[in-house]
Image (cartoon, coloured by chain):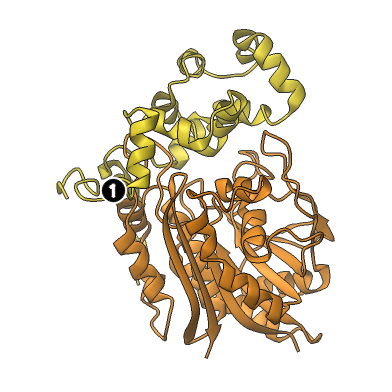
Amino acid sequence: MARITAGVASSHIPALGVASDFDKTAEPYWAPAFAGYEWTKRWEAEQKPDVVILVYNDHASAFDMKIIPTFAIGCGESYQPADEGWGPRKVPVVEGHPDLAWHIAQSLIIDEFDMTIINEMDVDHGLTVPLSMMFGKPEAWPCKVIPLAVNVVTYPPPSGNRCWALGEAIARAVASFEEDLNVQVWGTGGMSHQLQGPRAGLINAAWDNDFLDGLVGDSDRLRHIPHIEYLRETGSEGIEMVMWLIMRGALGKATRVLHRHYHVPASNTAVGHIVLEPV
Amino acid sequence: MNRVTDIHAYLAEFDDIPGTRVFTAKRARAGYHLNQFAMSLMKPENRERWKADERAYLDGWAMTEEQKQAVLARDYNRLLDLGGNIYFLAKLFSTDGLSFLQAVSTMSGMSLDEYAAMMIAGGRSAEGQRSIREGR
């Protein structure tokens, strides 16, 4: 049977992708941000996950204003890196896992989560930057990826509670897939940042670290944080952290922390990263 | 459980955050053509046409004159007011060759150097930036 063995959360700041692509990761500005991923690169090389269910948001790349799905799951064979206006990132094609993805899609819909199913799309920095952070610069990504795109751009995004419950439903879906697969769930985006208006540049390290604390152990307090708290405390784009709760929900009742990293800044944003396993 | 039971109260709270325009349905509706214009700059052939004659390119879109003027002036705070969303507007400033850090700094009322220095020093504190009404 397929099993969820770990959860990973990470910021997906586009500038991290640029630093990786142009070999700037040793520069003084970028080195501390990347140093916190060295442990994870070694750990992932040992873990060798078969599939990563990668929760992210599209940034006006695959989806424009024409169609705004709240939760969309990628069931395609493969996904090209998107051209976000300056040419696609020169990173490997992302290979999907259509059998598991379709199984999860069916299971979620039967479980009353009304998913949008995507068979063809390009994937932007929201999905490819976390792959670079966890795997570096390989010729091909070492695992299959199931993209799970969440609308966190046009209000209202889903509640944290709904995201957590979706994670729980994903865990049930994975557990009923017959093939023996090592599956990880990644939640991406965040942490505190605001990319707009006179309040731009807001960072709240105390709040972010309390959020990281809340992912560990058997508390479910984070699922009850309302949108307005993310907006007030973590900046308008900090709302991306609801996506981390899909990962946390998928890990079950309790978690243990294996690794944790926090650094300010990368461009406009606080870098946060945590590796968890279910207990 | 903090289930939202009053959508008007839910939306009203967004206006209490200093220096922030939350991308609500109302803004998404007002900014539809503005954001789709910005999205069109993802295509290299459109970027060429845009660079050749910005005004003529804008006139091909069902945007308000106010929106067009704000685009021409690259007044990003104004564009947010008029329904622009930052991830769509990013196509515009990327076409101009600006990074997120450069473009975002123009909205902050600070110079790029001041803004970049603030970020390196840990970013803008949330203190006093959470609520207009409560002054916290």
Q: Quadrant of residue A172?
A: bottom right
Q: Left or right: A113 with respect to B84?
A: right
Which residue is rendered at x = 58% and y = 68% of the image? Answer: A38
Q: Quadrant of residue B45?
A: top right
- The residue pinned by badge 1 equals B13
Which residue is rendered at x = 57% and y = 53% of the image? Answer: A26
- Chain for colour orange: A
Q: Left or right: A5 with respect to A276?
A: right
Going by the numbered disc 1, the residue's amino acid type is Glu
Which residue is rendered at x = 63% and y = 70% of the image? Answer: A41
Across and down, in percent, residue A120 comes to 80, 52
Q: Is residue A127 above or below residue B2?
A: above
Whether residue A256 is visible, yes or no, is yes
- Chain for colour yellow: B
Across and down, in percent, residue A35 comes to 52, 63
Across and down, in percent, residue A189 comes to 52, 57
Q: Is residue A279 above or below residue A163?
A: below
Q: Secondary structure at mark 1?
A: helix
Across and down, in percent, residue B44 comes to 75, 26
Q: Quadrant of the N terminus of chain A?
A: bottom right
Whether residue A166 is visible, yes or no, is no
The chain to which mark 1 is attached is B
